[in-house]
Image (cartoon, helix red, strand yellow):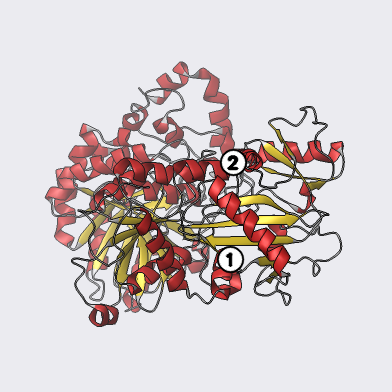
Amino acid sequence: MNLKEFCNKYPEVVDDIQKVKRVYPMKLSEYYLGLIKEKGDAIWKQCIPDIKELEDSLNDEDPLLEEEYTPVPCLVHRYPDRVLLLASNKCAMYCRFCTRKRKVGKEVTITKEMISSAIDYIRQHKEVRDVIISGGDPLMLDDDILEWIIKGIREIKHVEIIRIGTRVPCTLPSRITPELVNMLKKYHPLFVNVHFEHPAEITEESKKACELLADAGIPLNNQAVLLKGVNDDVKVLKELFHKLIQIRVKPYYLYQADQVKGTEHFRTTIEEGIDIMHKMIGFTSGMCVPQFIVDAPGGGKIPLLPEYAQHRTEESLFLKNFEGKIVEYKNPLSIEVKKKSTSGRMRIAVVFNMKKEAAKNMPEDAYAEFDEITVPLAIKKALEKKGHVAELVEANESFVEKIKQGDYDFVFNIAEGLNSGARESQIPAILDMLGIPYTGSGVLTQAITLDKTRTKEILMYHGVPTPGYQLFNHWDEKISKNITFPLIIKPNAEGSSKGIRNNSLVNNEKELRKMVKFVVNNYKQAALAEEYLEGREFTVSIIGNNPPKVLPIVEITFDYLPSGVHKFDSYEVKWYWDNPTNPVDPVVCPAKIDDELRKKIEDVALRAYKALGIVDLCRMDMRLDKQGTPHVIDVNALPGLMPDPLENSRFPKACYTAGMSYEKIINTVLSEAMKRYGLPAETKRLKHASRNSV
């Protein structure tokens, strides 16, 4: 199909093409035009002018500032030891996303004198060891002109390698002739960087062109650009890179699209590019994975990778592999100092969810319950000091495969789970199914205690005081006569004060409906309206089983808060005001209370602990009513275990006050769990021990 036939077939686009051509020239080969299968496909988008090119007012004509690094015509010297020689401003096809859209196809003649001046510059600058011949496309030059350029560069002694950047093997493969190849191979070491963007461009013709070059001993690398609607899909790029390897072309760079005027509609976000790399690295062979590059304005090429390094210490680097498994790489001195056999010792998986940034369409506290890497690392260290072999295992979508392959004797579980309302029960359910013992409460208890309404129902049945409430599945439900204002509105199945804001305290129906609507819309779950108790607030931590031990009681004080900030443990209070920089510590432990109140609080806590079937450890929040009776307002069977005392993690705070070290906390929880399973607490393998939970 030629261009005339194309216009007859698609007459509706001719006017737009003409408008764009006046600003940005159009040129394409009949060969490449023939690769179009349908209107708007990946090939079409790369070669057919789009009216969107004229609508781009955001970008620059020269975003890479090449003109600023042009000491003589036709030569760009941006990097210390290499230069870019622009030998032509013509191409077989004018790509609609071209970085040099300002130059290509314009009526500007590149003369022999200009090229000679550029070669003289290279000759005078002995630091230049690498010359890239580009354009336009240098292979659009006649063989004799091209050889004159290459020969002139090759005669410069300090130039070690010559590279040619071309899209001809993709857009006009017939240009790669035996005569051209025989000329090029005289000037080794010579490399050719080609530009394939989509697997549909790998044809018998382009394959033959690349094979001619490869057979001449010319290494071929591919530089692709990540283009919206063309190849911004991991399946498409994998197919492209696999096909390139088969024709002996190494995927070299995957460029983030440059900020070139007229190309905004092709640009993706950098996050999309990193996500694509994450889905390729480890899931296909390394030789098929290019470097993801951002050519930053004025900054040069910057490689980007998914974040694999999770945490650094003097002894080790903790890395996340392609499966999401956290592994430790020990520094050389650490290996020598700590080198000892791991055979015969218990293997424990520390299972957790990694805290991450909330997406733009999510509440800022979406991952408030998840842990910074420092928490599982501290648990790992505490277990290892006791003589165990501990590994970090993230509770993500590949958890089942990782835990089955890990050959673990026991799991120290702090995982919050993903997605569902009963998410804290996910890991216990999987471990029960696989017969692997674990710390903390089981499936039913974790599911119930995350659901505040179910928790309150059980507490009320057992006569454990808890404030009156109503559950709202929708903002306009009728308000029960059994509850009275003021009320606290909170998500029904969250912890860490998620969704409990300063304005969650409501005093009338209008405020209630507004906050219920906020919770339902933002947290995608029912909203609990709970009667607000104006008395003192406490946190009670319990450790162990037979019998469980109530740790020193924590009081949360609010007198330091400024006017307008309500006196309850909202998200703002817990995460903004309660921090190491605050001169007032709102967490008082042990709480300044008399024996009578202490006994009341302990009694309520132990009754709730038993009623809900909690084991090993727990933290529950209470407030006093006007009569001084403690009421349970929240139960967390999976309490936070931040190791730093300044973080005011409530459960460790109570343990520290009781005289326990962090190592003691962790290993006490483990020991209590092992006793439940009827397992010996000694540091040895447990493969032949009973795994039946009690």
Q: Which residue position holds label 1?
A: 649
Is 445 displayed left or right of 170 in the figure?
Answer: right
Marks 1 and 2, the one that precedes in the sequence: 2
Amino acid on which disc 2 is placed: Asp
* Coordinates of residue 487 in the picture (x, y in percent): 80, 44
Which residue is drawn at the image coordinates 26% and 82% (left, top)? 337
> Quarter-wise, where is residue 305 in the image?
bottom left
Is the Cβ of the residue at disc 1 closer than 8 Å to that at disc 2? no
Identify the element where label 1 is drawn.
loop
**Up-down relation of residue 439 to residue 122 (above or below):** above
Mark sitting on residue 391? none
Name the residue at 40% across, 39% down: 233
Mark 2 element type? loop
Q: Is residue 387 left or right of residue 515?
A: left
Residue on which the image places disc 2: 451
Distance in Å between CA atoms under marks 1 and 2: 22 Å
Within 10 Å of disc 1 (Cα), the crowding (few <14, some 14-19, many 20+) is: some
Residue 74 visible in rendering = no
Amino acid at circle 1: Ser
Q: Position of residue 25 (x, y in %)?
A: 50, 39
Q: Is residue 530 visible?
A: yes
Q: Nearer the viewer, residue 673 or 638?
A: 673
Q: Residues within 10 Å of mark 2 (few under 14, many from 20)?
A: many
